[in-house]
Amino acid sequence: EVQLVESGGGLVQPGRSLKLSCLASGFTFSNYGMNWIRQAPGKGLEWVASISSSSSYIYYADTVKGRFTISRDNAKNTLYLQMTSLRSEDTALYYCARHRGLGADYFDYWGQGVMVTVSS
Amino acid sequence: DIVLTQSPALAVSLGQRATISCRASQSVSISRYNLMHWYQQKPGQQPKLLIYRASNLASGIPARFSGSGSGTDFTLTINPVQADDIATYYCQQSRESPPTFGGGTKLELK
């Protein structure tokens, strides 16, 4: 069974940093591209970042480019999101999701999400 | 970015057909591929893939869900609607980066 379990969220002050993790199991992690997708409270879904299976290709949404860094450790079956210079508008539930197809085509498995709250 | 437009809500009776639409600001089709996908999200849960590439049923999804469309206009159909289908439904395109989602359609009981 495919499982994605996020961790590392919490309450952080504006301008500070936070690192999210997503532990994958039930599939060969190193064969799949992975993503972070977020959902602000009561709002819709926003794709944040994508990383290919071997980390050769990395993409970011304009809203986080230069502040967030996606990475992965295939030996540890873990996806990361390093978030710096956090803003109130980054407050959201952050999901990790596996993608299929060419590039970030569609997202076939999602974690349960981890909450990040940016507030003073 | 490609903008996807969905109606905010749709009221339907149990046992009836629900048709949820998604319109893209530009074509999301390439050759024979229609790069539109659908997700279901119930309150307090993560999104679940229902339909990929417009009309392909994801693994484990009941056959009462179906998808159609091409170019800029796409439809998710649920027939017949069951109580367990009450949720918010999102479309998502992968024709261009960044991948974008519609605002979601909340399916409600009439």
Image (cartoon, coloured by chain):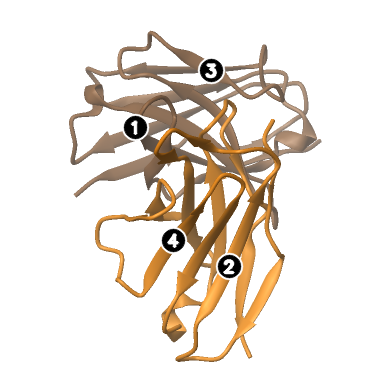
Chain colours: A brown, B orange
The furthest residue to the front: B31
Residue A113 in sight: yes
* Numbered badge on residue A101: 1
Quarter of the image containing the C terminus of chain B? bottom right
Chain of the residue that carries numbered disc 1 in the rendered image: A
Q: Which residue is tagged 4?
A: B67
Residue B46 in sight: no
Q: Which residue is tagged 2?
A: B20
User: Is there a contact, CB below 8 Å, between mark 1 and mark 4?
Assistant: no
* Closer to the eye: label 3 or 4: 4
Task: State the residue at coordinates (70%, 58%).
Answer: A42
* Numbered badge on residue A59: 3
Identify whether A84 is placed above or below B29. Answer: above
Q: Amino acid at mark 4?
A: Gly
Q: Is residue A61 left or right of residue A49?
A: right
**Distance from Cα at disc 1 to Cα at disc 3:** 16 Å
**Distance from Cα at disc 1 to Cα at disc 4:** 18 Å
**Distance from Cα at disc 3 to Cα at disc 2:** 30 Å
Marks 3 and 2 share the same chain: no
Task: State the residue at coordinates (61%, 80%).
Answer: B108
Q: Amino acid at mark 3?
A: Tyr
Under circle 1, the secondary element is: loop
Between B50 and A82, which is closer to the camera in this rendering? B50
Under circle 4, the secondary element is: strand
**Residue A114: image x %, image y %?**
51, 44
* Closer to the eye: label 3 or 2: 2
Q: Amino acid at mark 2?
A: Ile
**Mark 1 or 3, nearer chain start:** 3
